Image (cartoon, rainbow, N blue to C red):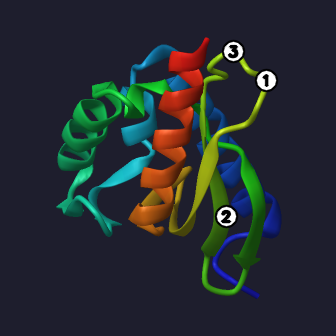
Amino acid sequence: MGKWTREELQQAHDHYAAVAAEAARTGDWRAWADQFTEDAEYVEHHFGTFHGREAIYEWISKTMAEWPNSEMKSFPHAWCVCDEERGWWVCRIENRFEDPGDGEVYQEHNITVLHYAGDDQWSYEEDAYNPANFGDTVKRWIDARRAR
């Protein structure tokens, strides 16, 4: 038996996803960053490693306010695996752009690894993805937007 129940792990994950959805909708990333412990580590393969809740908040707020990142308005989880014994989640998260008007879905995924710290807090996140794939998707999305 792990340190946390499956129910607590699931509730924390569901809350994480819901808070991310609200942050993407509003552009206010404070509540999302507050889900991390004060000493959390966030490894983002393109932007670097961030230490602590405030560093995570500063980075995510700035990054998601910049275009075209600001046009990613939803982050659905395609699938997740939970290691109940150790409190780890591994998820495929889609980074979905707003519909440019053609009805197509423009998204690229990343693999996110999360470590639960208890009390609805996360102590670690790592996002891995292929920047070239993101670049191609952004180009197609921009072209579709221009065509409208």
Residue depicted at x 23% and y 58%: 47
Residue 103, which numbered label?
A: 1
Callout in the foreground (2, 1): 1
Residue type beneath disc 3:
Gly
User: Label 3 vs label 1: CA separation?
Assistant: 6 Å
Residue type beneath disc 2:
Arg
Residue 92, which numbered label?
A: 2
Callout in the foreground (3, 2): 3
Q: Callout 3 environment at 10 Å: few (<14), some (14 to 19), or many (20+)?
A: few
User: Label 2 vs label 1: CA separation?
Assistant: 23 Å
Question: Residue 122's spot in the image, x, y percent?
Answer: 46, 59
Of residues 77 and 119, the one nearer the viewer is 77
User: Label 3 vs label 2: CA separation?
Assistant: 26 Å
Residue type beneath disc 1:
Gly
Left/right placement of residue 13 relative to residue 46 reads: right
Question: Residue 111's spot in the image, x, y percent?
Answer: 57, 69
Residue 83, which numbered label?
A: none
Of residues 86 and 78, the one nearer the viewer is 78
Question: Residue 52's spot in the image, x, y percent?
Answer: 21, 55
